Image (tube, rainbow, N blue to C red):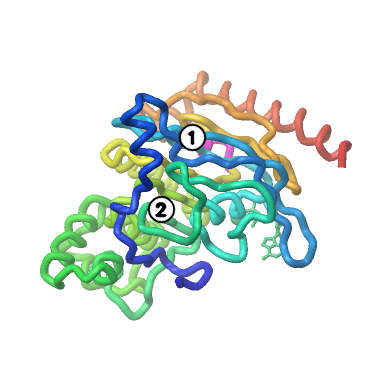
Amino acid sequence: MPSDGAPPSDPAPSSAVPPPAAAAASAGRPVAIVQFERVTKTYDDGFTAIKDVSFTIEDLPNKGEFITILGPSGCGKSTILRLIAGLRPQFPPTAGAVLVGGRPVERPGADRGMVFQDYTAFENRTVEENVAFGLECRGMPRKARLERARDWIRRVGLDPVRDADKYPCQLSGGMRQRVAIARSLILDPRIILMDEPFGALDPTTRMRMQDLLVELWRALQATVFFVTHSIEEAVYLGDRTFVISSAPGTILKEVKVPPPDRPAHVMQREPAFLEVVFSLRDMIERLEPSTRAGD
Ligand SMILES: Nc1ncnc2c1ncn2[C@@H]1O[C@H](COP(=O)(O)OP(=O)(O)O)[C@@H](O)[C@H]1O
Ligand SMILES: [Mg+2]
């Protein structure tokens, strides 16, 4: 059992996609890839972090939806993500059900890849060995896994020749986060869980990483849950944004936002984009005091 906060290393094969989803698909019914049914999490100290959270995300064929989760610090964003990942102590929920592919989550699995803010990597392993780690856990032979790792090093914008043998301490924050993304996506997860992955990056690097992520997501066609407290980032990356209230977190609003069909540094200065950002900010300001008043 991986320890909390550890890199995703569960060697379970991604073929563990549950049959109910396949059955629904073959019957022509929409498949819920992730579903929360009135999920509440109260921690051991009695603090309720999220309350009655319900949502359904369908597995959009040949696309995968990009969900951004937006809310103030401490509102339960990481709690939601880690419940999907099956990571303790957020998992299991106190009440309600967390379903992935129609089945209750029981433990972490390689069908769900997680990327944290703090550049998760083994300091004593090279870039290449870090990226290949999950394949090593699956027992893939060294030559094959290093080849795949080099391909992923390239896909995340690093240089397989110059960077593969470096250690994490020799990398910038942006490069470290590229390694963290590669080591997660190399396992081809159907669901990608990202917890403020660009929160510690400077604005220019952050936009480059946003572009990279959009490109990778389009190629992988996975479902992404991306936590941020940047409204710009949520609007740029998302198909849909969930606005979460302060603790106990509830979904205040689901907003459809324009797709990222232009580079971040272009789109994020366009008046139409800024209009969406400002209206979302106004909406959050209107919604938040009313939830506080109801506490
Ligand atoms: N293991 C825990 N025990 C008690 N309280 C916790 C625990 N983990 C998180 N919390 C509390 O739950 C709330 C939500 O936490 P979290 O999901 O990490 O918020 P966010 O990611 O939105 O900043 C916070 O008030 C936090 O202090
Ligand atoms: Mg958090």
Viewer-closest of 14 and 295: 14
Q: Which residues are magenta?
A: 230-234
Q: Magenta stretch containing residue 66, yes or no?
A: no
Q: Quadrant of residue 153?
A: bottom left
| x, y percent for residue 279 | 64, 23
Circle 1 Cα neighbour tier, 10 Å, few/some/many (<14 / 14–19 / ≥20): some
Q: Quadrant of residue 114?
A: bottom left
The first of marks 2 and 1 along the sequence is 1
Amino acid at pointer 2: Arg
Outermost residue to the top:
272
Q: At 29% from the left edge and 31% from the top edge, which residue is drawn?
A: 62
Q: At 40% from the left edge and 29% from the top edge, which residue is drawn?
A: 260
Tell me if residue 217 comes above or below residue 136 in the rendering.
Answer: above
Q: In the rendered structure, find residue 57 and report the number of the disc placed on it.
A: 1
Q: Quadrant of residue 108?
A: bottom left
| x, y percent for residue 155 | 23, 50
| x, y percent for residue 265 | 41, 34
Residue 293: in sight, yes or no?
yes
Viewer-closest of 54 and 260: 54
Relative to residue 156, is residue 281 drawn left or right?
Answer: right
Tell me the quarter of the image containing the C terminus.
top right
Viewer-closest of 4 and 227: 4
Q: Main secondary structure of the magenta part?
A: helix
Viewer-closest of 102 and 79: 102
Give the residue number, with chain letter if any, for mark 2.
112
Amino acid at pointer 1: Ile
